[in-house]
Image (spheres, coloured by chain):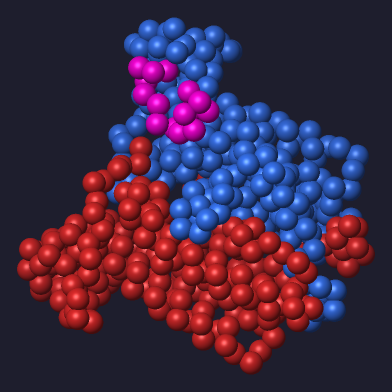
Chain colours: A red, B blue
Amino acid sequence: MASQLNTSIPTRPQGGKNSTAEKLLIAASELMIERASIEVSLSDIAQKSGVNAALVKYHFGNKDGLLLALLARDAATEMSGLEYLISQPISPTAKLKLHIGGIIRAYYQFPYMNRLIHYLLHESSTEAADEVSKFFVAPLLEFQRRLLAEGIKAGEFRNIDPVMFYTSLVGACDHLFFGRHAMSRATGVGPVTDEVCREYIKHMEALICGGMLNGKEKGAAAG
Amino acid sequence: MASQLNTSIPTRPQGGKNSTAEKLLIAASELMIERASIEVSLSDIAQKSGVNAALVKYHFGNKDGLLLALLARDAATEMSGLEYLISQPISPTAKLKLHIGGIIRAYYQFPYMNRLIHYLLHESSTEAADEVSKFFVAPLLEFQRRLLAEGIKAGEFRNIDPVMFYTSLVGACDHLFFGRHAMSRATGVGPVTDEVCREYIKHMEALICGGMLNGKEKGAAAG
């Protein structure tokens, strides 16, 4: 069952960027990418980074603290990308499509991100899950709220509930990565390659924008 | 991290329905519903069912075996519902809408089903995950393949890849239940009630069928 680790969220050392902490995060992310798994030990991370294992404990408290700091680092990059996107002089529909591609590409480029989110939200401590909600779920939902309001105001989107929109878009993107492994076992579906990723972006853009019915059925569906 | 339990999938005792095994499954599902959690012990299940704890081991091997048998029982009910649905004299679009509602209602009525699937696919043994793929993922994908082919043939659906369709629909439905807990923490989103469930069904029907763009943008989106 889900292990309830007794984790306390470490406060980051004050004074801006910390090169030792950064080195550790870089080593952790590289190991996770190499192994295609978030199962890396603190001693592996210490060894790869050339940092004394005791310093891992000093900077992050424990392994969950390090995993949380790694996700926070990557989330910060993604969230600043969202700010940039919303400020662009393009239509809400064009922003929506770029956003869909952005979510899927982020999961693809950082395969450990999806697994980290699931682990921290569901298998680690309540405090870690709260942190992930605060720096990942809440800003993403807020971005989508603004984008939907913009599109509705411009007359491009129909009225759609932001929480339900968030749930279906994030769930659908997440499932390409989280659900794929299970599908590949019994159903002959292959792994997520570059091409699958590109095809899924096209699929999701078309589905979210226009649904799957041919024109003649659309009137009935909207009713 | 995910615990790799050393599970062997038990073969069911031969000779049709087994009332002791059924009693245990009923007790397990009732306990999970009462507690809104899949964290129930074998001794709790034995006590509630009035069956000797040694018989749990005899019938299911271990706890993962019992969880797998429980999911298999519920999956069998759902899969026979799919057979019934596909044979109905209604349009593919009407079947699709009933199917969307069916997935969301099944998760809502058996809240432990979603958690069981995640646990067995990702936190238990490879053998258990393979079994779930075989009796849950594969038949659901096969049903959707048939439904999509029917709708494309009838001219109601555009050409859509069944594996991508499965991924986005199941992911979006799953996330209402799996992702909600995380959202409620930091974002003030409430729990999944009867009303939320009904609203999400309407949302998903409209999104999957017609997307979210207003008419004037649809032509551009399809191109």
Looking at the rendered image, the quarter that the N terminus of chain A falls into is top left
User: Is residue B37 positioned above or below B47 on the image?
Assistant: below
Q: Which portion, as a residue range, is magenta?
A: B31-45
Q: Residue lying farthest bottom?
A: A89
Say if the magenta span includes residue B119: no
Picture mark count: 0
Residue B145 seen in the current view:
no
What residue is at 82 percent from the left and 62 percent from the top? A213
Does residue B91 appear in this view?
yes
Q: Position of residue B36 (x, y in %)?
A: 49, 33
- Residue A127 is situated, as x and y percent measured from the top left of the image, at 33, 53
**Could you tell whether A219 is left or right of B48 in the image?**
right
Q: Nearer the viewer, residue A38 or A86?
A: A86
Q: Is B33 part of what is drawn in magenta? A: yes
Q: Is residue B74 above or below residue A147?
A: above
Dividing the picture into quadrants, the one containing residue B121 is top left
- Judged left or right of residue B129, residue A131 is left
Location of residue A158 (image quadrant) = bottom right
Name the residue at 39% across, 18% down: B44
Most common SS among magenta residues: helix
Towards the viewer: B128 or A48: A48
| Residue B138 position in % (x across, y down) | 60, 44
Quadrant into which the C terminus of chain A falls? bottom right
